[in-house]
Amino acid sequence: MRDQAEELRMQMLRSQNRLGRSIAVVSGKGGVGKSNFSMNFTTTLSGLGKKVVLIDMDIGMGNIHILLGKTVPTNLKDYLVGEKSIEEVMFEGPNNLRYISGGSGLSGVMEWNEKMFERLVQAFEYLQRNYDYIVFDMGAGATRQTLDLLVSVDEIIVITTAEPTSITDAYSMMKFIHFKDPDKNYFLLCNRAFSEEEGEDTTSRLQLAMSKFLSKEIIVLGSLPEDPVVRKSVKEQVPFSILYPNAAITKKLKHIVSRFADFEMEDQAIPKQSKFISRLKKLFSGRS
C-alpha cells in the first residue's frame, strides 16, 4: 500500500498534468441569447474560484466586450496577424474572468493562413496550461475554421430555445459534429423558457432525438427562464449574474454552473489529457 506521502505526490502529479477543459458554446441559430449566456456562465464559473478565459470567436463581429460595457484596444485578430502577444489581447472581467474580444466593426470573414494557425495553437497551448476552462463563444454560421474548432474541443454546450426552428437547428448542429466525432460530450440548455415545464419538454425532445436516431446520450444542464432582468442588464452592460445576484435566473444559473463544474466522466478517476490541440493540428494539416 502507498503511504500518505506517496499518495500526496501522485495527487500533485495529476494536478500538474491536468490541462484546462476546452468548451465551445454554440447554438443552431442566432437570437437565442448565446453570447449573454457565455458571459454569465463564465463569470459565475470564475466566481467559484476557477481560472476561466472566455474567447469571442466571432472575429470582427464579436460582442463580448460590448456586453461588459468595455472598449478594448486590441482583439483576437490583432494576435492572429502577429501585431500583439496573447497577454496583450486578454482583459479582465468580473470575478477575475479573463476574456479575449473578437473585435467589432470589421469583416467577420477571415481565412486563417498557416502562420495564423500556428499562433492560434500556441495561444491555446498556453491557455490550457494556465487556465481551468477555455470557453469559446462561437459566432453564428459555420466556416471551415469554426467547424474545425468545434470538432476539436473537449466539450460542447448547446443553447436552444423552445422555438421549433431553434430545436431543429440545435439538433442539426449536434448531428453534424457527431458524425465527425461520435465521442464528443454535449451539454444541453434551454434558454428563455417561459416555464419549467417548457424547458424540460424542450431538452427532453432533443435528448430523445439524439438517443433514438444517433444512439448518443447527452447531458441536460437544465433551463433558464425568460426574465426581464436580462434585458435590463444588457442595457446597463453588466452581466445579470453580477447586477442582479438575487434574481431567479441568477440562482438557477449558479445551480447549473455548479453542476457543470462538478461533472466528470465516469471513467475519469484520473482525468485524461485533453486531446484538443492534437485534434486541431490533425484537422488543419489534413486540409492544408
Image: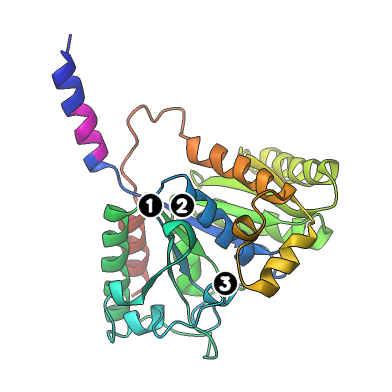
Q: How are the colours assigned in the image?
A: rainbow
Q: Please rate how many residues cluster around mark 2, counting C-alpha atoms within 10 Å: few if below 14, some from 14 to 19, many from 20.
A: many
Q: CA distance from mark 3 to mark 1?
A: 23 Å
For marks 3 and 1, give the one nearer the viewer. 1
Outermost residue to the bottom: 106
Q: Which of the two discs, 2 and 3, labels the residue nearer the N terminus?
A: 2
Task: Out of 216 and 39, give the one closest to the viewer.
Answer: 39
Residue for badge 3 = 139
137 lies left or right of 214: left
- Residue 183 vertical placement versus 110 (above, below): above
Check whether the beta carbons of the residues at disc 2 and disc 1 lie within 8 A of each other. yes
Quadrant housing the N terminus? top left
Count of marks placed on residues: 3
Is label 2 in a helix, a strand or a loop?
A: helix
Residue at 48 percent across and 49 percent down: it is 47
Q: CA distance from mark 2 to mark 1?
A: 6 Å
Give the residue type at disc 3.
Gly
Q: Which of the two discs, 2 and 1, labels the residue nearer the N terminus?
A: 2
Quadrant housing the C terminus? bottom left
Residue 182 is a magenta residue: no
- Residue 6 vertical placement versus 72 (above, below): above
Give the residue type at disc 2.
Ser
Residue for badge 2 = 46
Residue at 26 percent across and 67 percent down: it is 122
**Spot occupied by residue 37 in the image (x, y as percentages of width and height):** 62, 59
Give the residue type at disc 1.
Lys
